[in-house]
Amino acid sequence: MNELDQAGLARLRDGWISGGTAFELAPAEWKEVATASSPDEQERRLLAIAAQALDVALRPVAPKTLKRRPPLPVLALPTLPERLRPLLRAALKYAADARLKTRVAALVASRGFVLHPMDWMPAASSQESPEVYAPWVDWQAGADGDKQSRREHLTAESWDDFYPAARRTALVELRRTTPALARTLIETKGASEPAEVRLALIELLRFGLGAEDVPFLKSLSADRSGKVREMAGRLLARLGEHGNPAGGGSEDPIAELAAFIEEGKSGFIRRRTTYAPIKLKSPAQQARRADLFASCYFGDLTAHFGKTEPDFIGAWQFGVDDNADRFLVLMVSVSGSDAAVARLADILVAEGGKHTLLVLQLMLRLDIGWKRVVITQILKDAQNLHALNLVEGAEAGWLEWGDLTNGKTLSALRSAVSGDNDVTKRSAEQYLEAIGFLATAATAEKLIGDVVAAGLSPASPSLALLRLNAALAENQSNK
């Protein structure tokens, strides 16, 4: 429609707005359609033609930057039933940030459902959302629909048929089942990817990491990305392939770090070697020690002292210097062997709740069984309940009622919700949210009744995830 047509429509509109007729103002072609009718019918016909022109012919052209999106992919699990969506929305509303909202989605996925996209969508950069949402992550990232977002098997030929999130999910699964195939794909197809993508691919080798990965990881010492070289070095260190990352094969950084550690003896009958951090004299020494712990590999440090990694951990004197303890745990978490991580977890958990925050630094290296042990210890001791929200990669829906009653947590929650201290009560409500994710449905239902009887309002938003948890079990039984 040109400018003259638009001007003509404007005159017609102005005539009708002023209460007059517009027949004489209409284009000649329009008059031919309406001329054989009565005056009122003429105006009605002109109005119909004008409306059609305005609503259809005069619609603005879409900008060239606008892109047509493919339909939202259908996920592998059914959508949460409509009757449970109000409970879900309440739980999502109470969840304070994206990580906690993702935890709500993880609980629902553990019970065999996915969320409605109008209630929640994972971010385009999400790596924490349940694997079932990988097609949505790719869709959010701008998948253009020219290829499938997921194929049955990931191979060298189908590599480009996978969007990034779906490809990551497939590679993780391959690393757990056929790690050599996954490594070959990362080696052959990842070489041409940008540094950021290569780094993410190399990081996946931590799943099923083994001696067969050593040659490939060593070849990455020539990678053009410093971050890739650093990641490869840490993975090699976990396999006992030591080599000072500070460069040049020099042992100076290791020797410098070792100088911050004092070797001693303990025991009257059976003398044993101990290791403890020396007392530092200045902030500069503290900063240097922190840098060395962060940049050196644990295996190189223990080799300097002539000890195996588990033996060195067993000889370390925890409690002498809290910062040194934290640096050591972080060092083990990124470059220690699996045996070292297991030994460290044994020692820290055996000490009870006083080392809870240290154990949390190991979470990414611990399996599901160990994570359950750590969470149970937190609940038993009840001194660091806030740590429940810091546990990474925890499993949903396993916590039994006996795990709550076998410790101080339940009594602490009852006392907090029945008291007048608003700060303590808010903290308790946050713990209820965390337990709502961990608990079985039966435990969730019992806990709701318990804290309500203790004085918490039945309408408290902090009960939202517990209510959803209990309702999900009811829906499963009705399937």
Image (cartoon, helix red, strand yellow):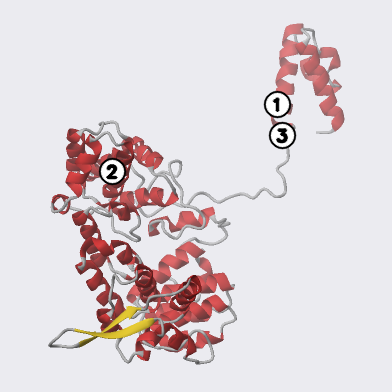
Image quadrant where one finds the C terminus: top left
Instruction: Identify the residue shown where x is 51% and y is 84%.
Output: 246
Viewer-nearest residue: 241 or 108: 241
Q: Position of residue 91 (x, y in %)?
A: 35, 41
Please state the horizontal and vertical placement of residue 396, each as a whole percent of the image: 28, 54
Query: In whole angstroms, how far apart are the C-alphas of marks 1 and 2?
Result: 61 Å
Task: Give the camera-side residue of 274 and 17.
Answer: 274
Sequence-wise, the earlier of marks 3 and 1 is 1
Residue 168 seen: yes
Q: Amino acid at mark 3?
A: Arg
Mark 3 and mark 2: Cα distance apart in space: 56 Å
| Front position among marks 3 and 2 | 2
Residue assigned mark 3? 59
Dot 2 surroundings within 10 Å: few (below 14), some, or many (20 or more)? many
Is 288 located above or below residue 77 in the figure? below
Place of residue 419 in the rendered image (x, y in percent of width and height, measured from the top left): 24, 35
What amino acid type should be assigned to the residue bearing mark 2? Ala
Q: Of the residues under marks 1 and 2, which one precedes in the sequence?
A: 1
Sequence-first disc among 3 and 2: 3
Kindly identify which numbered label has been placed on residue 173. none
Residue behind mark 2: 428
Q: Nearer the viewer, residue 30 or 458?
A: 458
Q: Is residue 238 visible?
A: no
Disc 1, SS = helix
**In this figure, which residue is indicated by the disc labeled 1?**
52
